[in-house]
């Protein structure tokens, strides 16, 4: 009889221990974390402006996840599932900027986006005239803008070249860096070596087109289109002109 009571007591104790384990279930795996970053906003020149109310959005995710910058340009995208993402930056009056292939993985903390981009407002500079004239072994390109660039107020342009007469900022072979102009018109001299380095050969017909741009052009490389995007260009411009490579 004593052995029977002892056996029953052991079974009861094991049952209590087993039930007690249910009070501490295994924790769920972490599948989300924040993405944190910042931006610096400027006018179309070099003057910093209000950093707030730029919308930052994770692309290609449902439900959508977005945030707006504060006065310091900082933002936090809340509880983003781990993965690889593209992120867009948008604000009225600014060209859209994008970052691609953001790796967001479980590191035990938020993903911090390094290298806060400097983003500018879209250009109000209109290109009103372009000519291209041979001068010996050089091509002299003259660009007129409205408003004109002056010593006190610089303006900015960018030109594109191609062997295709339908050249544009979306269809080009070569693009220049941003050019600061303080006189009107501005003359740009392209040497034979400049044109060779741009991918053109002697005797070829080349088309050139210019656009007003901003100091901070918000440019980025789009891996899907396999070309650079220039969001801040002023699309109001003149037709392309052509020249023959010396």
Image: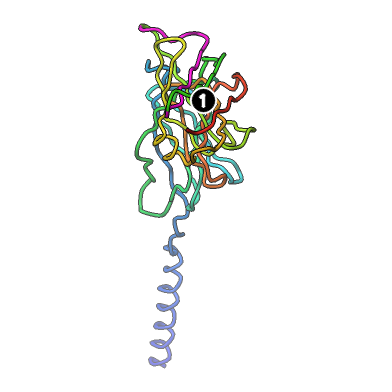
What count of labels does the image hold?
Answer: 1
Q: Residue tagged by mark 1?
A: 232
Instruction: Please tell me whether residue 228 belongs to the stretch shown in magenta.
Output: no
Left or right of residue 124, residue 109 in this image: left
Question: What residue appears at the point 38 percent right and 87 percent down from the top-left corner?
Answer: 6
Q: Is residue 144 magenta?
A: yes
Residue 233 x/y as whole percent: 53, 24
* 72 vs 76: above or below: above
Q: Position of residue 225 (x, y in %)?
A: 57, 44
**Camera-side residue: 143 or 118?**
143
Q: Who is closer to the viewer here, 28 or 131?
A: 131
Residue 26 against residue 233 in the figure, above or below: below
Instruction: Label the magenta part by its dominant secondary structure.
Output: strand
Q: Residue 133's x, y, as percent?
A: 50, 21
Quadrant where the N terminus sits is bottom left
As helix, strand or loop, the secondary structure at mark 1 comes to loop
Residue at (56, 42) in percent of width and height = 59
For residue 7, what is the image quadrant?
bottom left
In magenta, the rendered stretch is 137-151
Instruction: Determine the image quadrant of residue 20.
Output: bottom left
Q: Residue at x 42, y 53 (%)?
A: 105
Characterize the local packing of mark 1: few (<14), some (14-19) or many (20 or more) Cα atoms within 10 angstroms.
many
Q: Residue at x 53, y 29 (%)?
A: 231
């Amino acid at each position: 009889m004593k052995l029977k009571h002892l056996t029953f007591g052991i079974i009861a104790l094991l049952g209590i221990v087993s039930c007690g384990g249910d009070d501490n279930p295994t924790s769920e795996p972490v599948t989300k974390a924040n993405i944190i970053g910042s931006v610096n906003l400027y006018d179309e020149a070099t003057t910093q402006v209000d950093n707030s109310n730029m919308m930052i959005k994770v692309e290609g995710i449902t439900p959508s996840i977005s945030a707006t910058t504060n006065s310091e340009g900082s933002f936090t995208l809340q509880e983003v599932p781990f993965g690889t993402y593209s992120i867009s930056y948008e604000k009225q009056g600014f060209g859209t900027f994008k970052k691609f292939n953001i790796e967001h993985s479980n590191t035990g903390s938020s993903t911090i986006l390094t290298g806060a981009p400097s983003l500018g407002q879209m250009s109000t500079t209109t290109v009103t005239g372009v000519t291209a004239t041979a001068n010996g072994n050089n091509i002299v390109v003259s660009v007129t803008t409205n408003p004109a660039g002056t010593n006190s107020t610089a303006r900015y342009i960018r030109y594109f070249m191609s062997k295709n007469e339908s050249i544009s900022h979306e269809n080009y072979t070569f693009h220049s860096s941003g050019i600061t102009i303080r006189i009107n018109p501005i003359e740009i001299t392209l040497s034979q070596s400049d044109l060779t380095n741009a991918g053109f050969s002697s005797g070829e017909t080349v088309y050139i087109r210019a656009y007003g741009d901003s100091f901070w052009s918000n440019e980025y490389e789009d891996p899907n289109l396999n070309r650079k995007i220039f969001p801040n260009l002023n699309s109001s411009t003149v037709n392309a002109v052509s020249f023959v490579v010396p």
